[in-house]
Structures are given as structure tokens and as C-alpha cells.
């Protein structure tokens, strides 16, 4: 019997990164990206067009924004940065950690899409929000939002899908659950059924992600110096909250 702790972590961003476009295709980001773009257009004047995405992954969401914005993107995974480069050849890419990176310049908007879920503690979140504040121009905005809050995750949740590209067919099952409701983490287990040239191969992957109450997000963004506005969007027809931060003059305790 395979125990969850025996499953290797983060393979979708390492040796299985070639499967990522089948797990979450670029076109699946179009609806959400259009709403991010609406917020950027609303909050920034036309001359404000420099954006920084932290935890860019394969760059799917970003690819819908680069027509109007000059982008710099950061990720810890070289495999994901290679995917991003193919999709966004004009984007400056840096391999680094969103909690600690300091580029020495400022941007009009800082974006963190779903990579924010890999922050496992309030300290991780606070360091990431400090990174956003350190890179933001006056009048700029910070947009982020987790997949789940502790308040809204009622697991376990199961998703599955089959997609193909050329001779490669992938069926995956994604199982998200909270093994210990007393802490700030949850787990996602993937099973990948990979058919190629008539052969079936089965791989497993495990992701540990953060799970915090919504009030903690707002509190920590405030401590980092942000005034926070809630914006409801939809992704795949499902309502989802983005937190839009603007730097306030006096950080709140």
C-alpha cells in the first residue's frame, strides 16, 4: 500500500513538467485572465505598463496580458521557466524565490496567480507580501488570491480529466484534502495515467499547499502596507476572490 508521505513532491514542476500544458491548458486561463486584465486597465493609467509576476509557472495567465504590458516573471522551477519562455518569448525571466527576491527596481503591478498557494506559513505569506511591496511603484497595485481559504475548503475534492496532444494521451486524477485541520496546510495528490505509443505508464505526485483563514490574508497584507479590496471573478464559471492591494502610507498592525 502506498502511503501519501511516500509519494515524491512537486514532480509536475520537475520531471513531469512536460505534462503541465495537458493538466492546465493555456485556453483554460482565458476567462480568468480577461478579468485580471480588466482590473489592470481600471487601476492603472495607460503609461503604467510594467508588471512583475511572481511564481509565473508556465506563463499561461501572463500570456493573455503581455499584449498590453511589459513583463518580468519569476519562478523557482527551471522546467516551468522553459515552458514560460516558449509561450512568452519577450518576457524577462528570473529563477528565484518570491519570498526573498529583490530585483532592485519597481513595477506598476505585482501579480501572483495560483503559485501563492505554496506558501505554507504566515511567515511565508508575510515575506511574499513584503516582496510585492518592495517592488511596487507609487500608485501601483498588487493582485493575488488563493484557490481556497480555510473558511471555504470543504474537502476532500476530486477532479479528473483526459486530454491528448499528438501521440500523448493523459488522464489525471487530482485529490485535494486536509489531513490535519489544526494546521495551515493541505495536500493534493495527483495520479497520472500516461498513454504513449500504445503503452500505459502510471506516475504519482504530491503537493503540499497552504490553507489559511481569509482574515489572515487581509491582516498580513495590511501589515505589509497594503489597503485591500475584494474583487469577485469567475474561473470556469466558479466564483473566485482576488485580493487587490494598494500601498497605504502607514502599515497596519
Image (cartoon, grey):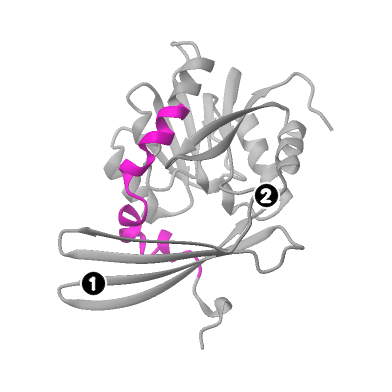
The quarter holding residue 184 reads: bottom right
Q: Position of residue 164 (x, y in %)?
A: 22, 59
- Check the picture and name the quadrant holding the C terminus: top right
Residue 91: quarter of image: top left
Question: Disc 1 on helix, strand or loop?
Answer: strand
In the picture provided, is 99 more to the left or to the right than 108?
right
Secondary structure under tag 2 reads helix
**Residue at (66, 37) in percent of width and height:** 129
Asked whether residue 230 is drawn in magenta, I would say no
Residue depicted at x 29% and y 41%? 87
Horizontally, residue 224 falls left or right of residue 198, namely right
Compare residues 184 and 131 and report the one nearer the observer.
184
Per the rendering, the mark at residue 124 is: 2
Q: Is the residue 227 above or below the residue 164 in the image?
A: above
Q: For the stretch drawn in magenta, what is the main secondary structure?
A: helix
Q: Residues within 10 Å of mark 1 (few under 14, many from 20)?
A: some
Q: Does 51 appear above or below 119? A: above
Q: CA distance from mark 1 to mark 2?
A: 38 Å
Please identify, in this view, whether the residue under mark 1 or under mark 2 is nearer the observer. Answer: 1
**Does residue 32 appear in the picture of this structure?**
yes
Amino acid at each position: 500500500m502506498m502511503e501519501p508521505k511516500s509519494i515524491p513532491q512537486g514532480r509536475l514542476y520537475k520531471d513531469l513538467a512536460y505534462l503541465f500544458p495537458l493538466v492546465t491548458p493555456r485556453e483554460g486561463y482565458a476567462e480568468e485572465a480577461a478579468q485580471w486584465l480588466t482590473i489592470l486597465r481600471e487601476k492603472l493609467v495607460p503609461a503604467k505598463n510594467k508588471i512583475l509576476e511572481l511564481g509565473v509557472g508556465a506563463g499561461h495567465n501572463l500570456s493573455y496580458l503581455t499584449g498590453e504590458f511589459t513583463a518580468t516573471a519569476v519562478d523557482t522551477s527551471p522546467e516551468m521557466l522553459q515552458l514560460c519562455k516558449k509561450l512568452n518569448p519577450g518576457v524577462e525571466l528570473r529563477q528565484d524565490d518570491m519570498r526573498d527576491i529583490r530585483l532592485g527596481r519597481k513595477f506598476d503591478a505585482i501579480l501572483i496567480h495560483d503559485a501563492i498557494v505554496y506558501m505554507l506559513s504566515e511567515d511565508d505569506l508575510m515575506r511574499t507580501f513584503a516582496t510585492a511591496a518592495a517592488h511596487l511603484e507609487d500608485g501601483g497595485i498588487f493582485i493575488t488570491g488563493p484557490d481556497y481559504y480555510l473558511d471555504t475548503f470543504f474537502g476532500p475534492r476530486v477532479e479528473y480529466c483526459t486530454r491528448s496532444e499528438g501521440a500523448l494521451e493523459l488522464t489525471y486524477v487530482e485529490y485535494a484534502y486536509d489531513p490535519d485541520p489544526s494546521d495551515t496546510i493541505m495536500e493534493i495528490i495527483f495520479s497520472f495515467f500516461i498513454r504513449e505509443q500504445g503503452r500505459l505508464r502510471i506516475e504519482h505526485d504530491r503537493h503540499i499547499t497552504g490553507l489559511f483563514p481569509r482574515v489572515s490574508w487581509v491582516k498580513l497584507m495590511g501589515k505589509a502596507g497594503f489597503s485591500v479590496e475584494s474583487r469577485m471573478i469567475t474561473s470556469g464559471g466558479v466564483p473566485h476572490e482576488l485580493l487587490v492591494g494598494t500601498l497605504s502610507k502607514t502599515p497596519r498592525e
